[in-house]
Amino acid sequence: MSEIRMALADLTPGRPTLVQTEGTRVVLVRVGDHVHALGDVCAHRGGPLSAGKLSGMRLACPWHGWMYDVRTGQCVFPGRGGAVPSYPVHVEDDEVRVEVS
């Protein structure tokens, strides 16, 4: 397991941010003071979720529009299976820590 650490101020609300650790691509999404971490690779065709658009709690892949709930990593389209990994995030004293397994 590895850990990503960064300042909360370095994450712009509503703008997905790509980080990498030990070869794993992770997209961080700040919604208000909450931060969510997902795998960056879309379950549909491998598009980069970090280049996608956030709408509320949904992150859309820029390639084909598949949408994921940033809280769980689950695809939100009915009848379409698929999920991306979701990683635990801790925010304390304006520092963001993400546990990536």
Image: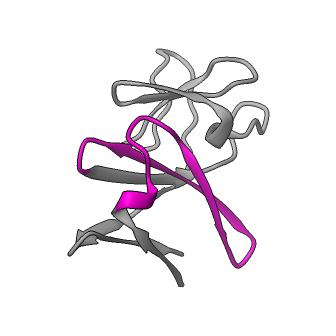
Q: Position of residue 19 (x, y in %)?
A: 62, 62
Q: Residue 37's image quarter? A: bottom left
Q: Spot the residue most to the front.
A: 9
Q: Say which quarter of the image contains residue 91.
A: bottom left
The reply, left or right, for residue 23 in relation to residue 54 is right
Is residue 62 highlighted in magenta?
no
For the N terminus, give its image quadrant. Answer: bottom right
Residue at 22 percent of width and 74 percent of height: 92
Q: Position of residue 28 (x, y in %)?
A: 49, 52
Q: How is the image coloured?
A: one colour
Residue positioned 61% across, 22% down in the render: 66
Closest to the observer: 61 or 51?
51
Q: Which residues are magenta?
A: 9-33
Which residue occupies the extreme bottom position in the image? 1
Q: Horizontally, is 101 left or right of 12 in the view?
A: right
Residue 70 horizontal/vertical position (percent): 41, 40
Q: Is residue 36 above or below residue 95?
A: above
Q: Residue at x 42, y 35 (%)?
A: 14
Query: Which is more toward the observer, 51 or 37?
Result: 51
Tell which of 60 and 72 is nearer to you. Answer: 60
Relative height, residue 54 to residue 95 (above, below): above
Residue 24 included in the magenta stretch of the image: yes
Residue beneath the point at 35% across and 62% down: 8
Q: Left or right: where does residue 65 sit relative to residue 45? A: left
Position of the C terminus, as image quadrant, is: bottom right
Percent x, y of residue 81: 56, 29
